[in-house]
Image: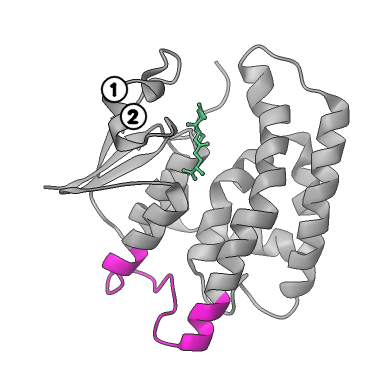
Amino acid sequence: MGLKVYGLPMSTNTARVIACLNEKGLEYELVPVDLRTGAHKQQPFISLNPFGQLPAFQDGDLTLFESRAITKYIAEKYKGTGPDLLRQGSITESAIVGVWLEVEAQQFGPPIADLVLEILIKPMLGGTTDPQAVEIHAEKLAKVLDVYEERLTKTKYIAGDHFTLVDLHHLPYTFCLMNTPKASLITCRPHVLAWWEDISSRPAWKKTAEGIKYGP
Ligand code: GS8
């Protein structure tokens, strides 16, 4: 049985999983889940993810949800294929990957998700952006990016001198941010910008991004 991703290419969390599969050059089947009809809150999808959120993933009899746990599984199972995304050959390098995986999930993820929701998703769904909320989320994200700017003066990628799962996890939301006026949060920081240009020009991400379309 092959690999199955349940989700949508324009869902950031689904795109995180697709980006990982593309880095590893793996074949998979994308099973669309229609958010507009609420299919994610109903059977059969909630048997795959009881929280009713995209994505879910199947590898034979194994069912997973939470995009970051799914990518970690893929990176471990296919460690011999494509880039070494977890640096497991070295205890120290893999510990540093672990640190920055947490930073992406706990520090970077929440403000960028809130910002993208406010600026990009709300208007797409017919709502209105709250400019005050935008500034609050942008300020929180700026503080995280200041740490990244400093870090990237010392290392080429976030967890060291190699592209890892840490960088990959940043791709979907940063891609969304770059389609908004708040792209300036990235472009005004030279090391963050150089890092973004590097990681977003990887063929696996370009292929993933082709599926992401905004607007009607
Ligand atoms: C978040 C999933 C999520 O919010 C993960 O997989 O990383 N921590 C989880 N999914 C959104 C789609 S955007 O990618 C979703 O399903 N939203 C609809 C909802 O929450 O009802």
What amino acid is found at the position of numbered circle 2 in the picture? Ile
Q: Which quarter shows the C terminus?
A: top right
Residues at marks 1 and 2 touching, judged by CB atoms closer than 8 Å: yes
**Foreground: 202 or 90?**
90
Q: Quick check: is 114 in the magenta stretch?
A: no
In which quadrant of the rendered view does residue 79 lie? Answer: bottom left
Mark carried by residue 17: none
Ligand 1 under 8 Å from disc 2 Cβ: no
Q: Quick check: is 79 in the magenta stretch?
A: yes
Q: Residue furthest left?
A: 1
Task: Give the residue drawn at x 73%, y 73%.
Answer: 151
Decide if residue 191 is on the left or right side of residue 188. Answer: left
Task: Give the residue drawn at x 78%, y 66%.
Answer: 147
Disc 2 element: helix
What amino acid is found at the position of numbered circle 1 in the picture? Gln
Decide if residue 44 is on the left or right side of residue 8. Answer: left
Q: Is residue 26 above or below residue 120?
A: below
**Foreground: 190 or 111?**
111
Are there few (<14), some (14-19), or many (20+) residues within 10 Å of tag 1? few
Q: Position of residue 88 (x, y in %)?
A: 40, 80
In which quadrant of the rendered view does residue 51 lie? Answer: top left
Task: Give the residue drawn at x 48%, y 34%.
Answer: 11
Disc 1 element: loop
Q: Is residue 78 above or below residue 26?
A: below
Q: Which residue is mark 1?
A: 43
| Residue 202 visible to the viewer | yes
Decide if residue 151 is on the left or right side of residue 202. Answer: right
Residue stretch in magenta? 75-96
In which quadrant of the rendered view does residue 100 lie? Answer: bottom right
Q: Position of residue 160 (x, y in %)?
A: 59, 78
Q: Which residue is mark 2?
A: 46
The Cα atoms of the two marked residues, 1 and 2, are separated by 5 Å
